[in-house]
Image (cartoon, rainbow, N blue to C red):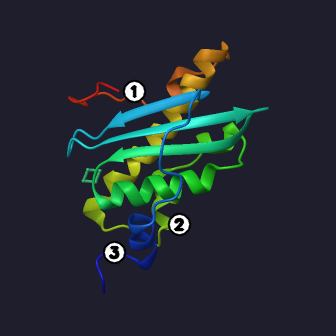
């Protein structure tokens, strides 16, 4: 069996939603302490719906595929739904990731949550901080 599914290879080779959003409504950046890779997510939000999302990922193929799939999964969705996206759901949508690469998909989950948190902060929207990643332990970006 191939190490990576066709979907992982597809999203790695042709990542969707790569880039930057000018004047975003929320930005989230996280680093993976295990490997030093970094992921940044930009959100454009209108009426509480994610109308556009872009990412920049400096990382391995699994992190790029995870970012790409995660952006596809939250585009057009309400912010509250994006908050519920788990790395497990991202990995499942990619038809699986090897066990030692599952941590790469965690970056996508956390970067999205941080971008939502940034959106809340910018707009003075109250939230429960416990629902967001603390991002402890990243020696690279302290995200
Ligand atoms: Fe760093 Fe995958 S090895 S995110």
State the separation of the CA atoms marked 3 and 1. Answer: 30 Å
Q: Is residue 132 left or right of residue 97?
A: right
Which quarter of the rendered picture does the N terminus lie within? Answer: bottom left
Question: Can you tell which mark lies on residue 134?
Answer: 1
Choose the circle earlier in sequence order: 3 or 1.
Answer: 3
Question: Distance from label 2 to label 1 (Cα)?
Answer: 25 Å
Q: Which residue is mark 3?
A: 4
Residue 66 appears in the picture as rendered: yes
The circle on residue 75 is: none
Residue drawn at x 55%, y 51% is 71
| Residue 93: mark | 2
As drawn, 7 above or below 122: below
Foreground disc of the pair 2, 1: 2
Residue found at x 36% / y 67%? 97
Helix or strand or loop: what does disc 3 sit on?
A: loop
Outermost residue, bottom side: 1
| Mark 2 Cα shell of 10 Å, populated few (<14), some (14-19), many (≥20) | some
Q: Quadrant where the C terminus lies?
A: top left
| Residue for point 62% across, 21% down | 120
Q: Residue furthest top?
A: 124
């Amino acid at each position: 069996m191939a190490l990576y599914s066709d979907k992982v290879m597809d999203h790695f080779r042709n990542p969707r939603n790569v880039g930057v959003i000018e004047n975003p409504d929320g930005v989230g950046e996280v680093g993976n302490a295990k490997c030093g890779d970094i992921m940044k997510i930009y959100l454009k939000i209108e009426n509480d719906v994610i109308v556009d999302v872009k990412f920049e990922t400096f990382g391995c193929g699994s992190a790029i595929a995870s970012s790409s799939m995660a952006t596809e999964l939250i585009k057009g969705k309400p912010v509250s739904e994006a908050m519920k996206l788990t790395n497990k759901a991202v990995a499942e949508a990619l038809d699986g990731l090897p066990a030692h690469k599952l941590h790469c998909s965690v970056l996508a989950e956390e970067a999205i949550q941080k971008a939502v948190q940034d959106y809340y902060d910018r707009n003075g929207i109250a939230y429960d901080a416990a629902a967001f990643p603390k991002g402890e332990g990243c020696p690279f970006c302290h995200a």
